[in-house]
Image (tube, rainbow, N blue to C red):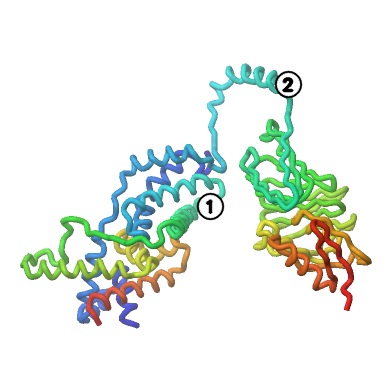
Amino acid sequence: MEENNDFLKWINGESSDKELVRLKEKENFKTLEKIAHYSSQIATPKIDIAHALKALEVKKKKTVNSGKLILFRTKRLYKYAAAVVLLFTSVYYLTLNSETTLKTEFAQRQRFNLPDNSEVILNANSEISYTKEDWNRTRNISLNGEAYFKVQKGEKFTVQTTLGDISVLGTQFNVKKRAHYFEVKTYEGLVRVHYKNTFIELPKGAVFKVINGVIDLNTTFNIQRKTWLQKESNFKSTPLQFVLEEIENQFDCTIETKNINLSTLYSGGFSHGDLNIALQSVTIPLQLSYEIKGKKITLYNYVR
Amino acid sequence: MAYKSLCSERFFNEFYVTHIQAASNFAYYKSGDQSASLDLAQEGFIKVWENCSKIDILKAKSYLFTIINNLFLNTIKHQKVVFTYAKNSPYLDVDNQSPEYLLEEEEFKDKLKSAILELTEKERSVFLMHRIDGKKYKEIAVLLEISQKAVEKRMSAALKKLRIKIDGI
């Protein structure tokens, strides 16, 4: 073993003269010397760099880089600027500012790219809208439902919901806005939440949750888990009512309950693969039973 | 520009010119495939370009190598590996020109080549990055995002296997 270490040192050119003399006396040193010598003679394909770079340029054109820098020669631009501004304003007012709306149905999940290459992944039964034309100046987006945002650096990025606004500069976060339920999770960077009269800065790993108007700031989450992005929904001390709504969203069904306390707190999750397994993951811990009839599900208390 | 950014065409090209040969070599050590190695390297640079604003410049090199490694793992997993020696490369003892010696050395080279093919792809890439690209253990560790100890371990394992295979002990 020690011999191996000596060899390792020697081949890296770190042996002292003394060590070298000692090494040279060893019988298998000859082999090592030859290995070192001939292995470095293996030929690798020689790259014609100029040629290869040209080939790369062609490929590069087909892709979009995430933060391309454009340098203007300002002086030369002035004379064109006036003409362009005139042209644009007239076109702008003629065509008007159209709004783009993206939407997912029940049991659907989709990924979109915004004009600046920021990413939005919409969960089931959710909707976002924004104006394309204004995008570079004001990155405003309105959301109803749940979405995961991966924002490119740039101007302030604002997500508006009827319950509160979220603004950031460039980061990753999740917003969930359902009826009477509002939740923001930060996966990267810092997110500012504006809810009614409160401004809250939400660091990585923190959750801002409002259920029926009551703010909960005490929960954290594991940023490694992107839950619904990995086809799973997870809850932590959440009233049953919202868990059931999420099942309805994910599986496109309606749920009715019989004599069940909908404010029972539920911690756990369900996967989006199989309705039966999902229902079991929610009902078994709460000691409930369920019945499926077509798209209608009835939940009732477990009867012995 | 106050700072260098990979998104700037000039700086990116500089980065490319500096590293394309080493990147292609790395792909070659992994795959042993002449034609695929340049493609893998190019693909790696495209990824760097696409993500230029997200990559820390100090880590761009490691990022590039990691990507190439991943691309390799995804595409050509079970390729038959082939290596060749550079033509007209000198023997160890340049003064000895006896036919017997030359034959012996050629035999040794063949043995060495086939022994290298039998190394694992991790051991081989570390060993060849060290031998051919002349990189130190530390540099290799940075590129592969592993510890220097891990590099030394792979190198040591490679040397041991090669010696055993060649000396037949």
| Circle 1: element type | loop
Is the C-beta separation of discs 1 and 2 under 8 Å? no
Does residue A20 lie above or below A127 as drawn? Answer: below
Indicate left or right for A210 with A28 as reference: right
x%, y% of residue A71?
53, 32
How far apart marks 1 and 2 lie (CA) works out to: 42 Å
Q: Amino acid at mark 2?
A: Tyr
Q: Which residue is mark 2?
A: A93
Is A30 in front, or is A211?
A211
Q: How many marks?
A: 2
In the current view of this chain or complex, which residue is farthest to the right? Answer: A259
Q: Position of residue A195 (x, y in %)?
A: 84, 49
Q: Chain of mark 1?
A: B
A264 or A152, nearer to the observer = A264
Q: Is residue B113 left or right of residue B59?
A: left
Chain containing mark 2:
A
- Could you say which quadrant of the image residue A4 lies in? bottom left
Which quadrant is the C terminus of chain A positioned in?
A: bottom right
Counting other residues with Cα less than 10 Å from the Cα at mark 2, is it few (<14), some (14-19), or many (20 or more)? few
* Residue B148 figure quarter: bottom left
Viewer-nearest residue: A244 or B40: A244
Of the 4 image quadrants, the one containing the N terminus of chain A is: bottom left
Q: Residue at x 23, y 60 (%)?
A: A41
Can see residue B115? yes
Name the spot of residue B131 as percent of width and height, x first: 30, 63
Of badges 1 and 2, the one in the foreground is 2
Instruction: Write the residue at 72% across / 34% down.
Output: A131
Quarter of the view holding residue A289: bottom right
**In the rendered structure, which amino acid carries the disc numbered 1?**
Asp
Determine whether A266 is above or below A194 in the image: below
Q: Which residue is mark 1?
A: B56
